[in-house]
Amino acid sequence: MLWTIRLSALLYAGALFAYWRRHPSARWVSLAAYLLYLAHVYLAFDQRYAWSHAAAYAETARQTRDLFGLDWGGGIYFNYAFTILWPLDFFYPRRLWLHAFLIFMFLNGVLVFGKWWR
């Protein structure tokens, strides 16, 4: 399951680079990254949370409590917003506010909640 999100993050970084270079492949690379992200969400909800929002909320609350001492699972809604907003990139590329949010979410997932450093 982790390989899907790791590859998605790498592809998204590649898409950002392609946007910066104004390369026409940027949207397609971003789309591939998004599809891998959707696979990650599917696998997480299927294998880890048994398609339960309550279970995902509780796990988010546990992780937030462990990291910050705050027992709050509302961060899951930021993940839902991430899922809904990312496709805007395919129709309205190079929107700074959108990429700022996507980068913020990827950095939180990798640096704050990621398991690579623990």
Image (cartoon, grey):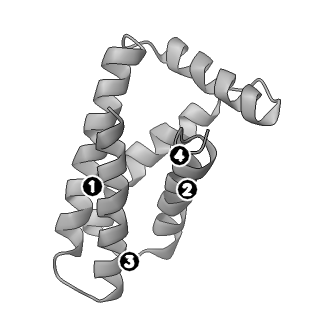
Q: CA distance from mark 1 to mark 3?
A: 16 Å
Contact? badges 1 and 3 (CB < 8 Å):
no
- Inspect the image, locate mark 3, and give the three-letter code of the amino acid beneath it: Arg
SS category of the residue bearing label 3: loop
Mark 2: few/some/many CA within 10 Å (<14, 14-19, 20+) = some
Image quadrant in which the N terminus is located: top left
Contact? badges 2 and 4 (CB < 8 Å):
yes
Q: Along the polypeptide, which appears first: circle 3 or circle 2?
A: 3
Q: Residue at x 23, y 74 (%)?
A: 26
Q: CA distance from mark 2 to mark 1?
A: 15 Å
Q: Which residue is mark 2?
A: 107
- Inspect the image, locate mark 1, and give the three-letter code of the amino acid beneath it: Ala
- Inspect the image, locate mark 4, and give the three-letter code of the amino acid beneath it: Gly
Q: Along the polypeptide, which appears first: circle 2 or circle 1?
A: 1
**Which of the two discs, 1 and 3, sits closer to the camera?**
1
User: Residue 106 vs residue 66: left or right?
Assistant: left
Mark 4: few/some/many CA within 10 Å (<14, 14-19, 20+) = some
Q: Which residue is mark 4?
A: 109
Q: Residue at x 53, y 46 (%)?
A: 109
Q: Which residue is mark 3?
A: 94
Nearest to the observer: residue 41 or residue 9: 9
- Inspect the image, locate mark 2, and give the three-letter code of the amino acid beneath it: Leu
Q: Which residue is mark 1?
A: 33
Q: Along the polypeptide, which appears first: circle 4 or circle 3?
A: 3
SS category of the residue bearing label 1: helix
Nearest to the observer: residue 99 or residue 92: 99
Q: CA distance from mark 4 to mark 3?
A: 22 Å
Q: Residue furthest right?
A: 69
